[in-house]
Amino acid sequence: MSGVNPWALGVFIFFFATTIVIGSFIQPIRKLLSRGKAAQSGEDWGLGGRQFGPWVTWFLVGGDFYTAYTVIAVPALVYAAGGYGFFALPYTIIVYPFIFLVMPKLWHIAHKGGHTTAADIVRARFNNRTLEIVVAITGLVAVMPYIALQLIGIRTVVQALGLPGDIPLVIAFLSLAAYTWLGGLHAPALTAFIKDIMIYIAVLVAVTVIPLHMGGYSALFASADHTQPVLKAGMGLPYSTLALSSALAAFLYPHTLTGILAARSADTIKQNAVFLPIYTIVLGLIAMLGFMAHVAGVNASSTSLVVPMLFQKVFPAWFSGFCLAAIAVGALVPAAVMAIGAANLVTHNLLPASKRSVNASRYTALAVKVGALLCVLFLNAQFAIDFQLLGGVIILQTFPALILGLLRIRFSAAAMLAGWAVGTVVGVGLCWLDGLKPIHPIALGPFSGNVSTGLISLFVNIAVVSLITLVKPSPHKNTAQG
């Protein structure tokens, strides 16, 4: 990137730093007002005291869909691959009925048993310490590439501002570390509405102003059709299977489940499931930025730079600085929830009770962010979105234990462990062989095509679970049916 524009940089620093300061100091202020009681509770740091009502939950849970994944990775994929990148839209539509039907039941189980994580729920259901540890470690590993995507988002906008070398990545890491360490879950809960308002403004202005520069939407789509076909031949199968696997994985992640369990009631979750599709409308508008970048003649050295370069090309410096700050905050807030959700898994499911504390959670969250940083440095993904999809392949292996375990079928812990092991080996192995691509070619007689690797590995997982259950069913019903 050429030069540093002081107006763009100044506006960016103001909004980004203000968000960090507000989030970082909310916990010390609460500690002062409550005479130290607020900061002494691990549940308060990790779940916000389970007291978030409909509005806060709406911003917190919905904010998990407005991340660097949405604003950087999806338009970048649309820019490079056309309409295939729009698979994120049906994915979010599929996931909301899933939230409405399944998540209130999980909330009841967690509330009744005092559970904080998915691994807690699995332990109560199957009474098996090994399965609990496996689920906890899976969530911990799966969330690291997802946080890596957020670090890439922050690094990308700082790069677009013209800062050289490794400075953007250092800024991204340190800002996330400070924000999470000091604020706990109250930080993203409080600042999530700031993030969403900033993104709303940036996106609504972009989808209004940018097409005007191109002669309107009719001219935009006519031009885009020549440069990027809506959906290339043979992409229908990977499009649909990625949408389905992403939907099944979405609320298995520790950060999305953290937002659910932090809700005040099961009705709060249902209310949010009804209104969360509003986010999908804006998601579709954001995805179209990839088409707009093509028509505007943006030529980025990395696809992750497409949206920042588009904003800088069309908008004045001060407003492009605001838009870049919105993207950075949009990565910062959910990344904090991700790190906190992972920390909850370690402190509640991997450490002995005597070692559990707020500081243990803080150090764990920091270690998770270091792991995410290593993903950025050493995993060579073609697209930024591949980091999130890799996490999806891993976290999907907990689907049978967490979700199928709600059924009245007598699944055994041994069946769940075997399914998890085989599914993980298949999923991660295929991803590695395919160069971290999220799809894998399969051929079954006359049927052939590219299918989501996550869906393939989940099918193998469930097949193993079902086979072992048929051969040797569990002698006891699963507990914690709530």
Image (spheres, rainbow, N blue to C red):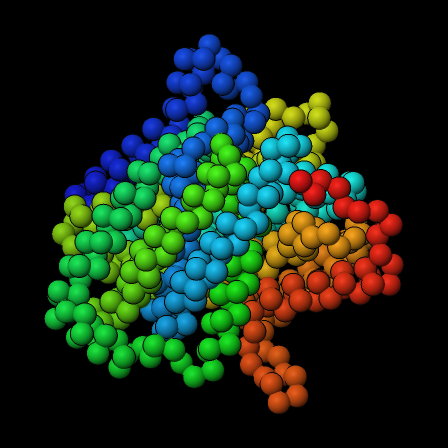
In depth, the one of 180 and 161 nearer the eye is 180
| Residue 222 visible within the image | yes
Q: Is residue 232 above or below residue 429?
A: below
Quarter of the picture holding the C terminus: top right
Q: Position of residue 461 (x, y in %)?
A: 71, 62
Left or right: residue 107 versus residue 207 is right
**Residue at x 63%, y 69% (from the top left corner):** 456
Left or right: residue 91 versus residue 40 is left
Q: Is residue 216 above or below residue 320?
A: below
In depth, the one of 315 and 196 nearer the eye is 196
Q: Position of residue 86 (x, y in %)?
A: 39, 67
**Residue at the farthest top position:** 35
Q: Is residue 81 above or below residue 112?
A: below
**Residue at x 70%, y 67% (from the top left corner):** 460
| Residue 368 visible within the image | no
In depth, the one of 133 and 172 nearer the eye is 133
In depth, the one of 170 and 361 nearer the eye is 361
Quadrant of residue 282 within the rendered picture: bottom left
Q: Position of residue 60 (x, y in %)?
A: 42, 40
Q: Position of residue 15 (x, y in %)?
A: 26, 37
Left or right: residue 327 versus residue 315 is right
Quarter of the picture holding the N terminus: bottom left
